[in-house]
Image (cartoon, coloured by chain):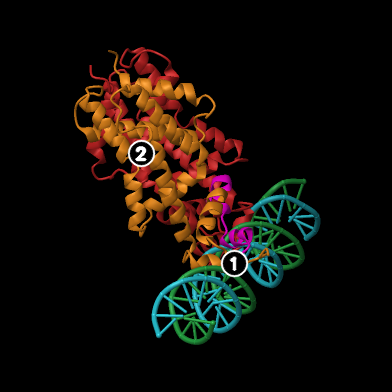
Chain colours: A red, B orange, C cyan, D green
Amino acid sequence: MAELTPYHHGDLRAALIARATEVVIADGVGALSLRELARDLGVSHGAPSRHFPDKQALLDALALNGFDRLRVDLAAAFPLDDSSVRFPDQLAGFAAAYVRFVVQNASLLAVMFAAKHREGAPDELRLAADRTFDEPMRGIERAQARGEVVAGDIEEVATTILATVHGFASLIAAGLLHPDVSGATLVGTVGRLIEGLRPR
Amino acid sequence: MAELTPYHHGDLRAALIARATEVVIADGVGALSLRELARDLGVSHGAPSRHFPDKQALLDALALNGFDRLRVDLAAAFPLDDSSVRFPDQLAGFAAAYVRFVVQNASLLAVMFAAKHREGAPDELRLAADRTFDEPMRGIERAQARGEVVAGDIEEVATTILATVHGFASLIAAGLLHPDVSGATLVGTVGRLIEGLRPR
DNA sequence: CTACATTGTTGTCAATGCCTACATCGGAGC
DNA sequence: GCTCCGATGTAGGCATTGACAACAATGTAG
């Protein structure tokens, strides 16, 4: 027979993360209430504390999850065997992936970076955040080795690229750039980044 | 004789904004409580509502204030009479000013952009945010007219620059770039932006 | 079957944001 | 100079929230 409300939820922890992510993305972190979350999932208001000692711990879990998803998305733009792809196209794909994530996960980004920046953040979270750009970094390095990217300090080159793409995405998230027209603008920006500002 | 606790505060509105800005910068928006704010300023817990109908209105005021200060800081890097300054130096100054603001106003940035992005944000705030980069934009245009910057769509060129600088600052704010070494890194990034990624 | 850790429930507490009724101040108009 | 009245601040109350503690149900290892 059907158990109407089994005592144990099954996987409350995962359900909390999933639902909380929805709420944060939809209405921002300010709209997230542990008690309402519990009500949504049909458990008592004290249940979440068995999985997250406090609200910040839940936010940390959301952030960790976000960084993992972002890392996977970004890594896809720099496949290991990329010798047949031109770097500008790779870069455009990378930027597009980043922008897509930012647009689709709007308010979650703020939670992610706030959690990472926070004093006393768990090491696991810090590490996940730091790994976010590892694959793109290596992709840039390979392009540099192929001579498609100007030689020089890899840190300097990579920082410029990451800053530009991250900044482009952030400007959209901040509403200073319209997501609608951003497709063409994105291509233009990447092209300008590659060609440089100084007249050739 | 000295009035110990005059009934009227004098300029409670400004005091609220000032103290709230301090708290947000120091401990983030999550640590901001209207009641504690009132206690700090020695007024009753209901007093703030005379100046801000709700907490969001106070945050909007903080954001407006922040955008104004940022705009002034950034405009200073592009003085109207800049014919004697080389564009790369101007750009470095602009980036340095932006980074300085971001580092000094850490958590306030999140409040600013969240408030701007928020549905139902006051027009005044939207306008202030949109004006933030007006002067730098004109400075870039002038540099372009002088032939120091590659010709072409001003939107495209300006977006690339703003995105890179904003992204660089954001990466620092997010803790993905260390503020200590950022001085040299910043110069390198700006240089790389000017010279382009493609080998010349 | 029985201890025991895990998970969920219930009740409680202080703090918060917001609302309403009331008190005090200070200036505009007479 | 006085009075009225809007602006500003106070006091109390209410629902919601996050955190905590005591208790109950469940599943499992031995």
The answer to whether residue A175 is visible is no
Q: Are marks 1 and 2 in contact (CB under 8 Å)?
A: no
Instruction: Identify residue type, mark 2.
Output: Ala
Circle 2 sits on which residue?
Answer: A169
Question: In this image, A112 relative to A187: left or right?
Answer: right
Q: Is residue B94 magenta?
A: no
* Residue picked out by circle 1: B45
Asked where in the image residue D27 lies, by quadrant, the reply is: bottom right
Q: Which residues are magenta?
A: B24-45
Q: Residue at x 28, y 45 (%)?
A: A178
Q: Nearer the viewer, mark 1 or mark 2?
A: 1
Q: Nearer the viewer, residue D20 or B24?
A: B24
Q: Amino acid at mark 1?
A: His
**Residue B161 position in % (x across, y down):** 32, 31
Mark 2 lies on a secondary structure that is helix
- Residue extending farthest to the left is B152
